[in-house]
């Protein structure tokens, strides 16, 4: 079959995210014998028109639309990315007779709900490289798709069987499908996945719907092989480990770092999802030797009450210990905090903000705050919110929906964050937009100068450079939210 796979991710909350998941699907589809074309609309000034051109040139039998983000998860300036996906699907309907298949992380989280918002014939949940080729084989032969695990059909009622999970997986093959130059100009990092599945039980997190709970780890030699090959062929300035939690379990992360060090690959590395549960001086030392220049750390709170509420599995002392280790490591770090979860009060907000003011005000460290927690279907937070009556049963969680504790006043909370920003300039609220043009100019300059990303590691310095502090004081970045 002629297959057109389409990726468009308009989200720019941090850096453009390369389509690693769709690359896995594209490779599996080609190995299954289909004729695959890959359309990446990053940087397109007219994405809908460009898609029409690809449809006309390709005349596909099936179009796969990858949907990475449901929305931007920022309560104060919510952006609903399903609308963008809906426009892509509408163009396919207008310009082609192809079957439309929806996939990607957003689809795995929403399940059948996504078909109410994006006009697809089928939705694939779980790991698409296992399921999508099976769906194509059924469509080609005229067989029923009803019993294929992970396939939801618009014309059939009922939930799909348990999504397919691959027992093992390897390199993404991303280099076969995209033009890296556009990502390099935007300061992107090359994504590497060392494992899938997360056994943690964070109340707000939907990762288990995307990857499952059982961990499937790649051999460190296989991970290093991929980095070595991509480095020689493409030469990205930095690689990023994009596991949901890079360092859980810690021994696997340490082994990956040790293999990269043993080979003397001389690459720049970073990681999202460094968890205090697996933090240690040995891990951070191994990361430093392997070539890490930064890491993202995700405690979400520094209050024992809120860490228990969010089911993080560690306590405030673990967060303080991780802060000491991170500072001693010399690695730039970006910390993520979410305020407003169940049980949040002025006291718990104060505990988290005081921790940041005391322990994270050092060069190379930036703290990102969100107020209000995105409620995703299937999570413990969704069940808790519905059980307490704070979330109407008929609420469509495909639309931006946020939980905010009734025990804390939001205006006070935003004011306290503004106060903390004046004391500690490297505190940033996710709703801030005032520095975006400034940051884009700086990022472009760093890219032209050949500096290794991620460029957020320079934010602590940039936010202290005059006149930025004065501008932030004159025009507080936070106000009353636009979305409830």
Image: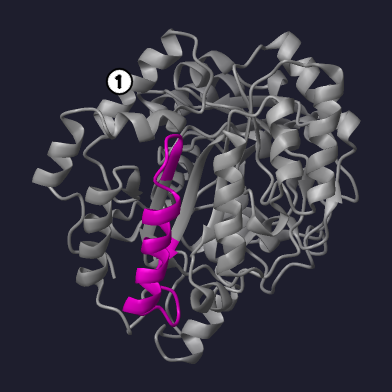
Q: Residue at 17% of width from left, 42% of height from top?
A: 472
**Quarter in which the C terminus is drawn:** bottom left
The type of colouring in the image is one colour
Circle 1 — which element?
helix
- Please state if 332 lies on the left or on the right of 360 as rendered: right
Residue 138 in magenta stretch: no
- Residue 244: x %, y % from top left: 66, 51
How many residues crowd mark 1 within 10 Å: few (<14), some (14–19), many (20+)?
A: few
Residue 357 in magenta stretch: yes
420 vs 337, nearest the viewer: 420
259 vs 184, nearest the viewer: 259
Q: Residue at 44% of width from left, 74% of height from top?
A: 341
Q: Residue at 41% of width from left, 48% of height from top?
A: 367
In the displayed structure, 300 sits above or below 50; it is below
- For the question of whether residue 138 can be seen, the reply is no
Query: Where does the magenta region start and end?
Result: 338-366
Q: Residue at 70% of width from left, 62% of height from top?
A: 208
- Residue 338: x %, y % from top left: 43, 63
- For the question of whether residue 460 can be seen, the reply is yes
- Please state if 441 lies on the left or on the right of 17 as rendered: left
Q: Quadrant of residue 46?
A: top left
In the displayed structure, 168 sits above or below 484; it is above
33 vs 466, nearest the viewer: 466
- Residue 455: x %, y % from top left: 45, 27
- Please state if 213 lies on the left or on the right of 387 as rendered: right
In the displayed structure, 397 sits above or below 135; it is below
**Quarter in which the N terminus is drawn:** top right
Q: Which residue is mark 1?
A: 441
- Please state if 162 lies on the left or on the right of 83 as rendered: right
């Amino acid at each position: 079959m002629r297959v057109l796979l389409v990726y468009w991710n308009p989200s720019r909350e941090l850096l453009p995210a390369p389509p690693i998941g769709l690359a896995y699907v594209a490779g599996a589809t080609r190995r299954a014998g289909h004729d695959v074309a890959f359309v990446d609309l990053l940087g397109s000034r007219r994405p809908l028109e460009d898609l029409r051109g690809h449809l006309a040139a390709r005349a596909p039998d099936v179009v796969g639309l990858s949907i990475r983000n449901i929305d931007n998860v920022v309560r104060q300036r919510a952006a609903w990315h399903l609308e963008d996906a809906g426009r892509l699907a509408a163009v396919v309907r207008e310009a082609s007779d192809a079957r439309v298949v929806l996939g990607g992380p957003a689809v795995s989280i929403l399940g059948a709900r996504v078909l109410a918002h994006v006009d697809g014939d089928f939705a694939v949940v779980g790991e698409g490289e296992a399921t999508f080729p099976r769906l194509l084989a059924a469509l080609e032969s005229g067989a029923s798709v009803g019993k294929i695990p992970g396939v939801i059909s618009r014309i059939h009622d009922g939930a799909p069987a348990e999504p397919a999970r691959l027992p093992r997986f390897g390199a993404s093959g991303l280099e076969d499908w995209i033009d890296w130059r556009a990502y390099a100009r935007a300061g992107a990092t090359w994504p590497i996945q060392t494992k899938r599945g997360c056994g943690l039980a964070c109340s707000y997190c939907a990762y288990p719907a995307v990857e499952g709970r059982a961990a499937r780890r790649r051999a460190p030699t296989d991970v290093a092989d991929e980095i070595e090959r991509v480095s020689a062929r493409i030469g990205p300035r930095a690689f990023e480990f994009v596991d949901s939690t890079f360092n859980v379990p810690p021994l696997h992360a340490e082994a990956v770092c040790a293999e990269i060090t043993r080979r003397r690959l001389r690459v720049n590395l970073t990681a999202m999802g460094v968890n205090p549960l697996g933090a240690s001086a040995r891990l951070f030392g191994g990361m430093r030797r392997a070539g890490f220049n930064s890491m993202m750390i995700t405690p979400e709170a520094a209050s024992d009450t809120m860490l228990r509420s969010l089911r993080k599995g560690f306590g405030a002392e673990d967060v303080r210990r991780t802060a000491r280790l991170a500072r001693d490591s010399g690695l730039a770090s970006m910390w993520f905090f979410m305020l407003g979860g169940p049980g949040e009060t002025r006291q718990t907000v104060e505990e988290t903000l005081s921790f940041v003011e005391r322990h994270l005000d050092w060069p190379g460290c930036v703290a990102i705050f969100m107020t209000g927690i995105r409620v995703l279907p299937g999570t413990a937070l969704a069940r808790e919110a519905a059980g307490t009556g704070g979330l109407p049963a008929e609420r469509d969680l495909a639309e931006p929906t946020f939980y905010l504790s009734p025990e804390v006043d939001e205006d006070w909370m935003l004011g306290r964050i503004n106060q903390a920003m004046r004391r500690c300039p490297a505190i940033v609220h996710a709703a801030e937009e005032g520095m975006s043009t400034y940051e884009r100019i700086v990022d472009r300059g760093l890219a032209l100068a050949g500096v290794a990303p991620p460029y957020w590691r320079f934010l602590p310095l940039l936010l202290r450079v005059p006149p930025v502090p004065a501008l932030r004081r004159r025009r507080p970045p936070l106000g009353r939210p636009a979305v409830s």
